[in-house]
Image (cartoon, rainbow, N blue to C red):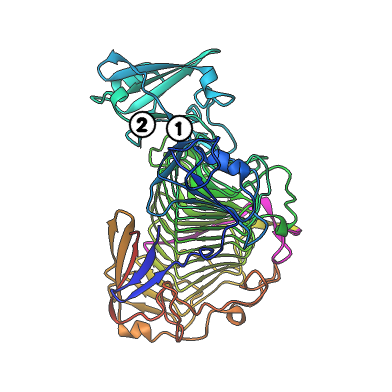
């Protein structure tokens, strides 16, 4: 699955996939026509991915052919290095679906669209998601919901508490489990569920190891859906999702479609038996070119495990779209305690809630050295970006944020070359808590501090309709070389090179399935705003953490590349390397 950024009709930036030229030690085949007693060759494939996962060795490639595989894939081992990965891939041009659900064809009609099925508890094995409700820290509404779900033709129904409510409302379900039998009632309207594709969740995960620390695993090109994991807050000894590396290292999760995770789609979080103080023991994952939809808590989330990860070119949409349950963990991307993570070129939209959080990107608690660059975020019910209890540096550059705004009780954040439309800044202090900061580019804790904004910088941003006038001066705040349009007002501490103009940006957004097109205008005087590069020299060393904006190896960075990976000839306002006077268009497409 390949995505690209486009600028007008003539510019595109394509993702280049790695590893294709590596010669596999062995290619193992899996097909619906196979048998797990076969040899696993092209003419004698296995029936299940789990069988291939049990026998694969470093350097092997597991090629899975078309079909639906209802199993929890638990890799037994990882690879030995970049050239000796264990690769799981969908066969070229074939649709391979891995589901945590089972099909049900034994529904009995109770009249007026209401149906019932009774299932022995033993059929669920040691995990019955209909006997377990959601629970955990920061889950603040909807705690009565179960971990299971019900689907009709691929679309999830909504859970209700009682049979009477289900009898009243179409496309709903409820359940009851005793010591021996689980009963599910569902209102399918006029549909006859035994003749349609009707499914229920049966497993807590779809692709997730049983042991921690596996390295060099690639998962490429699958549709992964219907996991029944619990709510996944920070602080758990084990965080689970539809797919995740379980605190492994050097995983690549790419070109997958991850949908209908009960809580989290891709989890990069806590697991037992890992030394969290050793940054070389975990992380360094690549999560790219995935479509992540309809996850109840978060598209991508995790505590600690996103260290040094690259999260790029993903489409994350419709997070918590049913608004059934939620709290202070709901976001398209939610990370805790990550070091040197890069979140770039993602399209994030439609994050919902009943109450409490519904953020686009949420970097929560002791994230350090993060870069958020080249993302498009809109239609979030709360802020598009929340920087919570981080001590920096955090570089937020070349993004387009529409509505919602930015919330921060963090310090040492640099906002550069962004287009911010209807996007106010809300800077608040949190003096009740103290989060840790680390020795640069490590997980070695130096000290803990309160969440008090300071040392933030704003350079070369375009503000439309909302500006920085609500931001009060704080220690180390600097803002200059910005453009304020359509009533957006500068900060009280604005430098002399910024401009306030009556020019209309005429911002427009056109949504498409799998993509978006954005248009905005600037005038020639705006393009004449220029000055020094945004780099370590301009930003300086932040006093709390003792580092500037720099890469994972400690080399200072310069923001000299625009949103579309085009080189800047000189600094210009906004996310484009070479904006032109008049109309500019940016498109994100998913073929």
Q: Nearer the viewer, mark 2 or mark 1?
A: 1
- Does the rendering let one see residue 67? yes
Dot 2 surroundings within 10 Å: few (below 14), some, or many (20 or more)? some
* Labelled disc at residue 74: none
Say whether residue 415 is magenta. no
* Labelled disc at residue 101: 1
Identify whether 46 is placed above or below 22. Answer: above
Q: What stretch is highlighted in magenta?
A: 421-446
Dot 1 surroundings within 10 Å: few (below 14), some, or many (20 or more)? many
Quarter where residue 420 is shown: bottom left
In x, y percent, where is residue 225?
Answer: 44, 40
- Mark 1 lies on a secondary structure that is strand
Considering depth in this image, is 183 or 50 the residue closer to the camera?
50
Residue at the spot 42% in from the left edge and 42% down from the top edge: 97
In x, y percent, where is residue 466?
Answer: 38, 65
* Labelled disc at residue 157: 2
Quarter where residue 259 is shown: top left
Left-right relation of 117 to 494: left
């Amino acid at each position: 699955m390949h995505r690209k950024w486009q600028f007008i009709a003539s510019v595109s930036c394509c993702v280049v996939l790695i590893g294709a030229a590596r010669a596999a030690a062995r290619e193992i085949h899996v097909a619906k026509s196979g048998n797990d007693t076969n040899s696993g060759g092209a003419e004698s494939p296995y029936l299940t991915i789990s069988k291939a996962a049990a026998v694969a060795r470093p350097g092997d490639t597991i090629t899975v052919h078309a079909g639906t595989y209802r199993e929890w894939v638990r890799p037994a081992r990882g690879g030995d290095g970049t050239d000796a990965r264990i690769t799981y891939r969908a066969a070229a041009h074939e649709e391979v679906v891995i589901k945590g659900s089972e099909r049900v064809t034994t529904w009995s009609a109770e009249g007026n669209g209401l149906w019932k099925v009774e299932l022995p508890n033993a059929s669920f094995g040691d995990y019955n998601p209909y006997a377990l409700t959601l629970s955990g820290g920061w889950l603040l509404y909807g705690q009565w919901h179960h971990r299971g779900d019900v689907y009709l033709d691929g679309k999830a129904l909504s859970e209700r508490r009682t049979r009477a409510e289900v009898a009243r409302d179409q496309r709903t379900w409820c359940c009851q489990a005793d010591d021996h039998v689980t009963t599910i009632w569902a209102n399918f309207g006029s549909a006859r569920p035994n003749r349609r594709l009707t499914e229920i969740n049966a497993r807590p995960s779809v692709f997730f190891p049983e042991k921690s620390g596996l390295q060099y695993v690639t998962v490429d090109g699958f549709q992964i859906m219907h996991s029944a994991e619990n709510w996944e807050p920070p602080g758990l000894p084990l965080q689970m999702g539809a797919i995740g590396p379980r605190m492994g290292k050097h995983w690549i999760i790419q070109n997958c479609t991850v949908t209908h995770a009960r809580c989290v789609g891709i989890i990069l979080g806590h697991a037992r038996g890992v030394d969290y103080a050793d940054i070389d023991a975990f992380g360094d994952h690549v999560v790219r070119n995935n479509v992540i939809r309809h996850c109840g808590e978060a598209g991508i989330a995790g505590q600690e495990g996103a260290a040094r990860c690259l999260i790029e070119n993903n489409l994350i949409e419709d997070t918590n779209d049913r608004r059934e349950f939620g709290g202070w963990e709901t976001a398209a991307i939610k990370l805790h305690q990550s070091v040197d993570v890069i979140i770039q070129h993602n399209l994030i939209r439609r994050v919902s809630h009943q109450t409490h959080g519904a953020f686009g990107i949420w970097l929560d608690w002791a994230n350090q050295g993060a870069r958020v660059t080249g993302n498009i975020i809109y239609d979030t019910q709360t802020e598009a970006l929340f920087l919570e209890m981080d001590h920096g540096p955090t570089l937020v550059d070349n993004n387009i944020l529409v509505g919602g705004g930015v919330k921060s009780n963090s310090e040492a954040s640099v906002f550069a070359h962004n287009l911010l439309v209807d996007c106010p800044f809300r800077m608040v202090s949190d003096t009740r808590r103290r989060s840790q900061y680390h020795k640069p580019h490590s997980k070695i804790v130096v000290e803990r501090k309160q969440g008090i904004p300071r040392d933030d910088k704003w350079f070369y941003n375009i503000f439309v309709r909302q500006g920085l006038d609500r931001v009060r001066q704080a220690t180390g705040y600097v803002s200059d070389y910005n453009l304020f349009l359509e009533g957006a007002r500068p900060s009280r501490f604005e430098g002399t090179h910024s401009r306030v103009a009556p020019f209309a940006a005429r911002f427009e957004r056109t949504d498409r399935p799998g993509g978006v097109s954005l248009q905005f205008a600037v005038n020639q005087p705006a393009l004449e705003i220029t000055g020094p590069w945004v780099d370590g020299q301009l930003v300086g060393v932040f006093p709390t953490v003792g580092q500037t904006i720099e890469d994972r190896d400690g080399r200072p960075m310069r923001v000299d590349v625009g949103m579309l990976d085009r080189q800047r000839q000189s600094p210009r306002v906004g996310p484009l390397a070479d904006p032109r006077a008049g109309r500019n268009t940016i498109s994100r497409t998913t073929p």
